[in-house]
Image: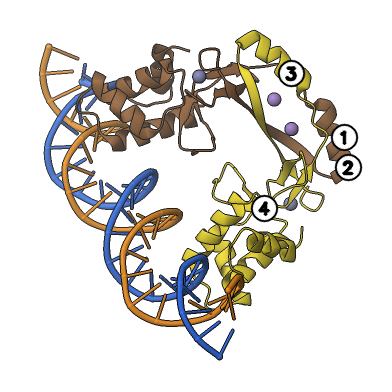
Chain colours: A yellow, B brown, C blue, D orange
Amino acid sequence: MSADTWLAQLHENGYRITAARRAVVEMVAKSTHALTPLEVYDLGRKKYRALGLVTVYRTLEKLEELHLIQRVHQPMGCQAFISMGQGHQHLLLCQNCGQAEYFEGDDLEALTKSISKKTGYQINEHWLQLFGLCANCR
Amino acid sequence: MSADTWLAQLHENGYRITAARRAVVEMVAKSTHALTPLEVYDLGRKKYRALGLVTVYRTLEKLEELHLIQRVHQPMGCQAFISMGQGHQHLLLCQNCGQAEYFEGDDLEALTKSISKKTGYQINEHWLQLFGLCANCR
DNA sequence: TCGGTAATGAAAATCATTATCAATAACTAT
DNA sequence: ATAGTTATTGATAATGATTTTCATTACCGA
Ligand SMILES: [Mn+2]
Ligand SMILES: [Mn+2]
Ligand SMILES: [Zn+2]
Ligand SMILES: [Zn+2]
């Protein structure tokens, strides 16, 4: 998903396209790492020097609301965001360099059905995340 | 795992047993919900009125270090702790009341093997969490 | 081009967490 | 059991991240 698509999405939802948003969107859209607000701020200022940290927070909030990005939970912290995957996908993260990849094909049908029966819970969603070392870091 | 076991663990690791720690341990050990430091503080003060919030933070830190509790990540926040499960288990959380259950039997061998081959990652661990509605809330 | 108003960034406020520190109390060695 | 050592405590202050406020700017539909 390209930066332009994100900007179009923002526009379609009644948000204005500004230099600050362009800078944030461009950096987050092309990153293969989950980025913290401060990291987005530092990167974004390379594109748009006057960018404010507050605007980064506000823009990330909107991108999350539109499901263009998602929050990434990690042992070291949970305040980082990454471009949303296509369809039903989960993240695989490098514990060394932070490189992120989406994967698909997990099948938890049998498991959730069995657990649902055993516990009486109605299971609505699942979080799955894999950690390891990428090809470069292993 | 009972509160007494936890206290014994603390003692074995060179930590002193105090009234403050008793209060924290007792409340966290018997809870079926993930508790935030503030919640532990409120509950703990029912057992030990003089308990300080700072001590709650410090005690939770030690319990986590000894793997007696674990941090629980949720959409609403990631600063909550719950008694650690036995062996290889994951959490199932009620989206309405917060009730938590451990389950086991997930098998991701085939999946991780296939993803490892496809991506070149060496996969070391996984996070899995189920969300739904408990028997009471559904 | 213009006007209404969403968006901005600087600054201040807030909130959770962490550090400091003098007083206390748990444990060890007598 | 007692005393001495020192880990632990809670109050307070400090910190750091996130949010709120607000006057100014600039996007964009008419
Ligand atoms: Mn899945
Ligand atoms: Mn598992
Ligand atoms: Zn790597
Ligand atoms: Zn419930």
Subunit that carries the residue with mark 3: A
Check contact, mark 2 vs mark 1: CB within 8 A: yes
Alpha carbons under labels 1 and 4: distance apart: 27 Å
Q: Give the number of the mark in front: 4 or 2.
A: 4
Question: Of A25 and D6, which appears nearest the observer?
Answer: A25
The residue type indicated by label 3 comes to Leu
Alpha carbons under labels 2 and 1: distance apart: 6 Å
The residue type indicated by label 1 comes to Ser
Depicted C25 relative to depicted A116: above or below: below
**Dot 3: element:** helix
Depicted B73 relative to depicted B7: above or below: below
Residue corresponding to mark 1 = B114
Q: Where is residue B57 in the image (x, y as percent from the top left)?
A: 36, 36
Q: Which residue is drawn at 73% across and 36% down?
A: B124
Alpha carbons under labels 3 and 1: distance apart: 19 Å
Q: Which residue is drawn at 23% across and 22% down?
A: B48
Residue corresponding to mark 3 = A111
Q: Position of residue A35 (x, y in %)?
A: 61, 57
Alpha carbons under labels 4 and 2: distance apart: 25 Å
Q: Position of residue A130 (x, y in %)?
A: 72, 37
Q: Which mark is residue A68?
A: 4
